[in-house]
Image (spheres, grey):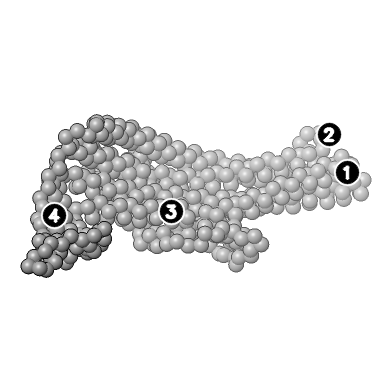
Amino acid sequence: MTASRVLAGGLAALWVTASLVAIAAPGDDQPSTRPGSRPVAMRLSMSQAVGIAVSKSKALAIASQSLRKAGGKVDEARAVTHPTATAAINGTHLDKGTTVKLNDADVPITVQNQIGVTVQATLPLDVAGQIRAALSIAEFSDLVAKLDVARTRNGVVADARSAYLDVLRAKAFVTVAEQALKNSQERSSTAQAYLKAGTGTRFDTLRAETDVANSAQVLISARNRVDLAMAALNNALGQDQNTPLELADAKAENTKAEPDPLANALQEAYDRRPEALQVDLQIRAADKGLILADRSVMPTFGLGWNLSFNPNVGALGRSTGWAAVASVSLPLFDGGLAKSRKVQAQADAASIRLVKQQVLDGVALEVRSAYLGWIEAAERMKVTDTALAQAEEQYRLAQVRFRNGVTLTPGASPLLEVSDAQTALTQAQANRINAEYDLLGSQTRLQKAVGRYAYEGETTGVAGR
């Protein structure tokens, strides 16, 4: 990967917004869900849900705090290149002072109580480039932290969209279960009427009542899945899980266009996924680490200036003085420290290149999985549309025969026939719902796989043509 692409990735991470940095401010450390809470109901579209998830995400807040820390490390590394100044004041008390007789007067040579003031200024000279290498490592780490915010955002947006679709899917199953229960109740009423009229059988009545009970259980489970999906969505939005939500249909915010060719999607993922850009920056940082390890055995240079003031030096001393110092430090023997640092730096550089292969292979598999899931779901949509139409017609015909007390098979129960038709219809409806939301979900997964949700201000629509 070229340096320009890495730089482009780093600059792209800067789109990760002031709003994300604002997330990093310390806040309430209490759980979002309070026992017995009754939050106000919310009406949301998918885009609104995504906005809430980004603004309230704990994961993004943590990543933003890490970004702040990385920025502090850059400032720390840069501070080493600047001149520094220190001041010190010290007081000394001797067991006794020293004096000499001069012309019958006691002249102090050493004062018993002494006060000294020292000011020292130093400037490091980065002749060997060690400081610059350390600063570059910190700057690369800062870019990696920016990209980590982007990586986290990519996941937060995708999770929110997926949770939103899960609620809609669960509600669609409730609608199917409610209709199946209604149909079962109507058949039970008809079977009882036939039994009272002497044209029905006790078996048909019991079978109809069993269908009602089974349909009621399915409906209970479907409603429970809605509650769980709603709690999961609230959790993805970073808010109280007891919050009632009314969701708009998500189809208007998703297209059903065919995805871009797999090769194009894969190249886009390599070019923009934060994880892929991060490892490139880490490789460059590791290379700088090698330079730093190589140069740790080179001499270091510095300039200094010292000012001292001691008003109690005695008769023979100077109360004020300054000195300019040029220093050169050359390591002669470090016990193998530099060599061990170089071995570690080489191991880091080699391992991060292997990590890059792992990351890109994982990205490629994720893109392929989402792409094939989209293609499969689109094909299933066509099949389930046909199957649903057939199942609806079969159920209609079975109902007509049931009301007339006839069957396709002589001697068979009309109720069993319509019951089987209802089972087939319910399955066809479930298959249609799954295919539809699998298609929408695969679109979200492909968007995440190519990194479309990573950077602020970019579209969260479907990459299709």
Marked residue nearer the N-terminal end (2 or 3): 3
Residue linked to disc 3: 62
Question: From mark 3 to mark 4, how far is it between C-alphas?
Answer: 42 Å
CB under 8 Å between callouts 2 and 1? no
* Eye-nearest disc, 4 or 2: 4
Residue at x 67%, y 43% (from the top left corner): 425
For badge 2, the amino acid type reads Gly
- Secondary structure beneath dot 3 equals helix
Q: Quadrant of the N terminus?
A: top left
Q: Residue 304 carries which label?
A: 4
- Secondary structure beneath dot 2 equals loop
Marked residue nearer the N-terminal end (4 or 2): 4
For badge 1, the amino acid type reads Gly
- Secondary structure beneath dot 4 equals strand
Residue 210 image-quadrant placement: top right
Question: From mark 3 to mark 1, how far is it between C-alphas?
Answer: 68 Å
- Camera-side residue: 71 or 23? 71
* Eye-nearest disc, 1 or 4: 4
Q: Which mark is residue 53?
A: none
- Crowding at dot 4, Cα within 10 Å, few <14 / some 14-19 / many 20+, comes out as some
Left or right side of 185 for 149: left
**Is residue 336 visible in the rendered structure shown here?**
yes
Left or right side of 51 for 147: left
Marked residue nearer the N-terminal end (3 or 4): 3
- Camera-side residue: 433 or 421? 433
For badge 4, the amino acid type reads Gly
106 to 11, vertically: above or below: below
CB under 8 Å between callouts 4 and 2? no
For badge 3, the amino acid type reads Ile
Residue linked to disc 2: 411
